[in-house]
Image: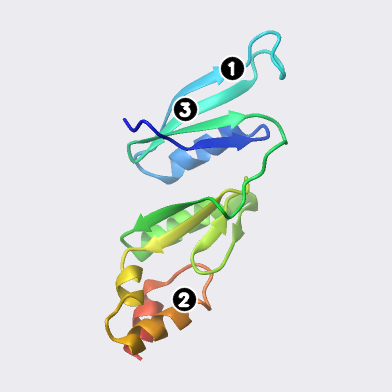
Amino acid sequence: MHRISPFLWFDNQAEEAANLYVSVFKDGRVVSTERWGAGGPYPEGSVMSVSFEIDGRAYQAFNGGPGQHFTEALSFYVDVDTQEEVDSIWEQLTANGGEPGRCGWLKDPYGLSWQIVPSGLRELLGDPDPGRASRSMQSMLTMSKLDIAVLRAAADG
């Protein structure tokens, strides 16, 4: 297990968010749920935090109240192999109040930013032929959800 893991502050949606995240990724699972005790700042028995794993990495989701909000300064980068994965993850994370962004970025229903990136994008943007790289970049800049076939076609001119 990793010694350092993301700690995500939610108003009161930690359990709902953790359940969404583990449902989106095949290898996700909720590890444990902790509840507020008597004398805590929230009702006794309500969810305080949820420990979950995705792809072998531990995450903590915490219900700390409305004092903190996610910004684009932190996002989760998801490297996917196929367009089908891009489409599936994109649809699940933007459903029920999520928002598509630009260039492969989105916000999930809780305001957390994600980048859903097909693995071939780095090769296209870093192509040694500056024309191919530029055409790929210009095509990407017009997109919300990334489409690797369209990006490859743009690179090919």
Image position of 114 (left or right of 2): right
Q: Position of residue 94 (x, y in %)?
A: 57, 55
Q: Which residue is mark 1?
A: 35
User: Pointer 3 and pointer 2: residues touching (CB < 8 Å)?
Assistant: no
Image position of 139 (left or right of 153): right
Disc 3 crowd rating (10 Å Cα; few below 14, some 14-19, many 20+) is: some
Measuring 55% from the left and 68% from the top, which residue is drawn there?
102
Image position of 123 (left or right of 100): left
Q: Which residue is mark 3?
A: 51
Q: Position of residue 24 (x, y in %)?
A: 44, 45
Dot 1 or dot 3: first in sequence order is 1
Q: Quadrant of residue 88?
A: bottom left
Q: Secondary structure at mark 3?
A: strand
Q: CA distance from mark 1 to mark 3?
A: 12 Å
Q: CA distance from mark 1 to mark 2?
A: 44 Å
What color scheme is it?
rainbow
Q: Is residue 3 above or below residue 88?
A: above
The amino acid beneath tag 2 is: Met
Q: Secondary structure at mark 2?
A: helix
The amino acid beneath tag 1 is: Arg
Q: Quadrant of residue 31?
A: top left
Q: CA distance from mark 3 to mark 2?
A: 35 Å
Measuring 43% from the left and 35% from the top, which residue is drawn there?
5
Q: Quadrant of residue 146?
A: bottom left
User: Which quadrant of the rendered structure holds the C terminus?
Assistant: bottom left
Dot 1 or dot 2: first in sequence order is 1
User: Which quadrant of the rendered structure holds the N terminus?
Assistant: top left
Q: Which residue is mark 2?
A: 140
Measuring 62% from the left and 46% from the top, which residue is drawn there?
70
Q: Is residue 42 above or below residue 88?
A: above
The amino acid beneath tag 3 is: Ser
